[in-house]
């Protein structure tokens, strides 16, 4: 596997570029322990605002911890309606610290529409309350393809991979296919889920119900039927159930939908 030989993407996202609230509301996060990727930290912040007990961010980006410290401080010190401006204004300061902002970002209106914690004061206050407890949110630098090395045998009720798996080509060797890489990982990820735990496996941009049957759909990058077959090569108990949930697109385009693939571990 070529993971250790690749140059790792180290930019941070000021805010998410996906409709996080669209799928997180399907995960019943109240009281749950959550593992998530996310160099924007919005996956973690939304999970806490939706009632997660603890959140661990596992990200290959070495700048995530530094960015988390800055953004969390801004959440605690700024009003909800001022947060977007405050985060964006910190770009020169963060670049002086060696942290580069991605140019892929939404405007303030779309950012607030995609994040539950920015949509109402009750959610924002709940997030701030949780951030005041240092045990609520922890950051671990690590690789989802080598989870045992980063988190040992720790288990979680919910695991969120955001859209990382759309970049499987980045992690595989030249001779591997994306499906070759996915197949052996599925049972390993399952060992880090509690019984009835849910793994948000894929985030699919601009995805419609009719796209399910489209091989190598350009908005996915992979044939979903082959993804399912790769996961199903594990034992049925490890594979669990796969569900596809649809919700409003992160772009806000009328009638457009995004989707997420959820893998539930059964007893």
Image (tube, rainbow, N blue to C red):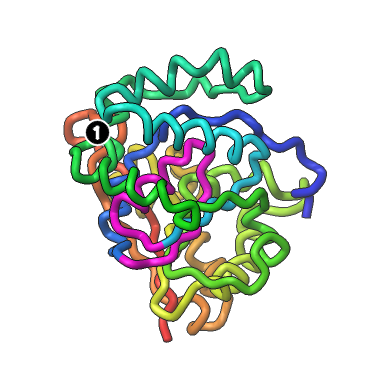
Q: Residues within 10 Å of mark 1 (few under 14, many from 20)?
A: some
Figure check: 164 above or below 200:
above
Residue plotted at (71% across, 37% down):
8
The magenta span reads: 31-53
Figure check: 249 above or below 2:
above
Residue plotted at (17% across, 30% down):
254
Along the line of sight, the residue nearer the viewer: 156 or 218: 156
Split into 4 quadrants, where in the image is the C terminus?
bottom left
Figure check: 122 above or below 161:
above
- Asked if the magenta segment contains residue 207, the reply would be no
Give the structural element (helix, strand or loop) at label 1: helix
Q: Position of residue 230 (x, y in %)?
A: 56, 66
Q: Position of residue 16 (x, y in %)?
A: 41, 35
**Mark 1, residue position:** 113
| Res. 148 in view | yes
Figure check: 62 above or below 159:
above
Residue extending farthest to the bottom is 267
Q: Position of residue 156 (x, y in %)?
A: 48, 69
| Res. 224 in view | no
Q: Position of residue 100 (x, y in %)?
A: 61, 22
Residue plotted at (68% across, 23% down):
98
- Asked if the magenta segment contains residue 32, the reply would be yes
Residue plotted at (34% across, 43% down):
128
Residue extending farthest to the right is 5
In this image, 239 relative to 76: left or right?
Answer: right
């Amino acid at each position: 596997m070529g993971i250790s030989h690749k140059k790792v993407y180290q930019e941070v996202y000021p805010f998410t570029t996906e409709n996080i609230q669209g799928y997180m509301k399907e995960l019943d996060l109240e009281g749950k322990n959550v593992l998530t990727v996310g160099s924007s930290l919005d996956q973690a912040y939304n999970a806490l605002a939706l009632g997660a007990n603890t959140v661990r961010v596992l990200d290959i980006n070495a700048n995530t911890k530094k960015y988390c410290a800055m953004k969390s401080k801004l959440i605690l010190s700024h009003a909800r309606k001022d947060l977007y401006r405050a985060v964006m204004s910190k770009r020169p300061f963060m670049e002086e610290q060696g942290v580069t902002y991605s140019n892929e970002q939404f405007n303030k209106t779309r950012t607030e529409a995609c994040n539950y914690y920015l949509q109402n004061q009750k959610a924002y206050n709940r997030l701030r309350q949780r951030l005041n407890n240092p045990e609520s949110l922890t950051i671990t630098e690590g690789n989802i393809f080598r989870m045992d090395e980063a988190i040992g045998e720790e288990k979680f009720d919910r695991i969120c991979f955001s859209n990382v798996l759309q970049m499987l080509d980045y992690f595989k060797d030249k001779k591997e296919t994306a499906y070759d890489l996915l197949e052996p990982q599925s049972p390993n990820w399952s060992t880090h889920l509690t019984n009835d735990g849910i793994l948000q496996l894929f985030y699919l941009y601009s995805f419609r119900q009719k796209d399910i049957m489209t091989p190598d759909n350009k908005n996915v990058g992979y044939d979903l039927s082959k993804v399912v077959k790769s996961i199903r090569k594990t034992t049925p108990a490890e594979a669990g159930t796969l569900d596809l949930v649809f919700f409003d697109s992160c772009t806000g385009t009328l009638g457009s939908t995004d989707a997420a693939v959820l893998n539930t571990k059964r007893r």
